[in-house]
Amino acid sequence: MTAQEHEEWRVKHDRREFITIGTLGLAALATPGAAQPADRPEPRQGGPFMKGPVFNQDDSEFCSTRSADQMSVQAIEDWVDSLQRAGVGTLITCVCAQTTNYPSKVWEPRWARYDPQGPDDQPVLKHLPADRIANTRRWLEAEMKLADLGINFHQVAYDRCRKHGMGAWASIRMNDLHDCDMPDSPLLSTFYKSQRDAGVCRVPYRMSGWTDRALDWERQEVREYFYKLVCELLGTLDLDGLELDWMRFGYHFQPGRELQGGKLLTEWVGQVRQECQKAAQRLGHPVRLGVRVPSRPDTARNLGMDAVAWAREELVDLVVPTPFWASCEFDMPMRTWHELLRGTQALLAGGIEVRYHPHPGAAAGMMSAQLAAGAATAVLAGRADMVYLFNYFGSGHGLSQTWGQDTYDRVLGAMGDLASLSALPRRHAVTYRDVRAPGEPDDNPLPATGNWCEFRLQTGPRPDGRQVSVLIETPKPEGEQAAPPAVRVNGVPCRLSETQDPKTFIYAVPASAFADEAHVLQVAPASGTSITVTRVEFAVQ
């Protein structure tokens, strides 16, 4: 962007108001006679550039699960073919963490400081845990092999996507912090370490956790650093869209500086939009812009990521509310997002993560096929345009083995529309949101303690003709048998049908309790005045 173009953009946008839920007027939307924004269509696909489900391929999974000898154009094409068979509509490949996975001319490639002939204690490896070194070496050498062969992983993948009619996008992680607590690692860039060592990270006075160690996007050199990568990608790749992944890792400004910083982000996103338009002129087809942001619109704005404003300013074409990583979030307010985006042309996709974690401190595991179907059903039933899959790797996370390849393909393929998806066995669970702006209170629903514990789950279409059950976990001291609690769904008593273990109980839900969109579960102690609940699931067979 030239100085004149930048000034014209600033003059146009400086007068805009930073949009909030309040100023947008959700109350007005429901008020008879109030001014109504242009109607937002029913959930829709975005043409050949964006179809659901969307599959995000992270920056390392392909090469970290294969050897250098397996690197070839054919291997990349076979992998894209497997996603197409599974029903994926759009592929988004991530080009970087702090370093790139391709031979960039403006950022360091991941292998820039790695010597394949060197020892395990060379500077870039010696701080890694011993059990990571061998796999890291194999992964780096696979990426190096692609570069030596002159193969650009991303362009090969995009060309193959077009043969299948799939969307082909690139993704940039805007503040990745993997290994940020180590002195060095292949995942740490020289630029990041220089910012960290200069004491100019996000919270330099504390540095107690990874959020403190994030780059501070209020610093001009940070914005310029990422802008160079944007320009390189848009100037060299033939792609349908570029995603700015603000959720890797989601904290970009000093506490209390987020709203001011958000104005800088809005200006910066506008500059990227102009680069997308230049790329479209070069390529002869549109190049869209998407963003991943926190699951709650107020949290997104309070962290500087005002995706609603970006959509209403026509800066972005895709908004993906999503959790960060700790757990898939089954209760994202997709209908609220839908209303906030009314009158814009931005598509809405609900991001589902691959990790299942009922509450902080609980044992965490991977999402099952039924849990994934339940989370995706809630997304589409909430009027999102499509489901967005993050970390749902068949090989890297072993889902094609743990689910079974046929189930993996069937579940991902069904995520293209609500009717197919809601017909599958599905499971809806109570989890929590893992991203909050500084000062936002904890509101984790579990563990819950009281004489009546109530939970609301988004459950999609009414499950008529289906067998429905509820799982309740209520712990007791070691060696004791917990007494089965009393359970009601939408006020209707449920019969205990199975005791899985001393603390886990399954209840049959009568058809008279069935409802569309959501169910309210009430749990009360069988005796005494209080009960603690640590896991809640609603299963539709």
Image: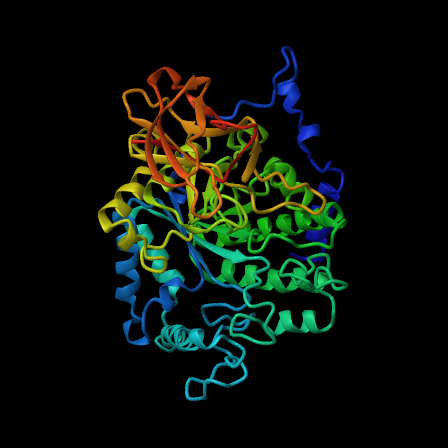
Report if residue 426 is visible in the image. Answer: yes
Can you tell which quarter of the image residue 58 is in? bottom left
Image colouring:
rainbow
Query: As drawn, is 432 to the left or to the right of 140?
Result: right
Q: Is residue 384 above or below residue 119?
A: above
Query: As drawn, is 252 to the left or to the right of 152?
Result: right
Q: Residue furthest bottom?
A: 118
User: At which x and y percent is residue 184?
Assistant: 57, 76
User: At which x and y percent is residue 317?
Assistant: 52, 41
Q: Residue furthest left?
A: 406
Can you tell which quarter of the image residue 147 is in? bottom left
Q: Which sits in the foreground, 105 or 460?
A: 460
Q: How many marks?
A: 0
Q: Is residue 251 above or below residue 500?
A: below
The residue depicted at 38 percent of the width and 40 percent of the height is 371
Picture quarter with the N terminus: bottom right
The residue depicted at 31 percent of the width and 46 percent of the height is 165
The residue depicted at 50 percent of the width and 63 percent of the height is 96
Q: Is residue 527 above or below residue 300?
A: above
User: At which x and y percent is residue 7?
Assistant: 73, 50
Q: Which sits in the foreground, 250 or 128?
A: 128
Query: As drawn, is 2 to the left or to the right of 363?
Result: right
User: At which x and y percent is residue 118?
Assistant: 45, 88
The residue depicted at 34 percent of the width and 66 percent of the height is 65
Picture quarter with the C terminus: top left
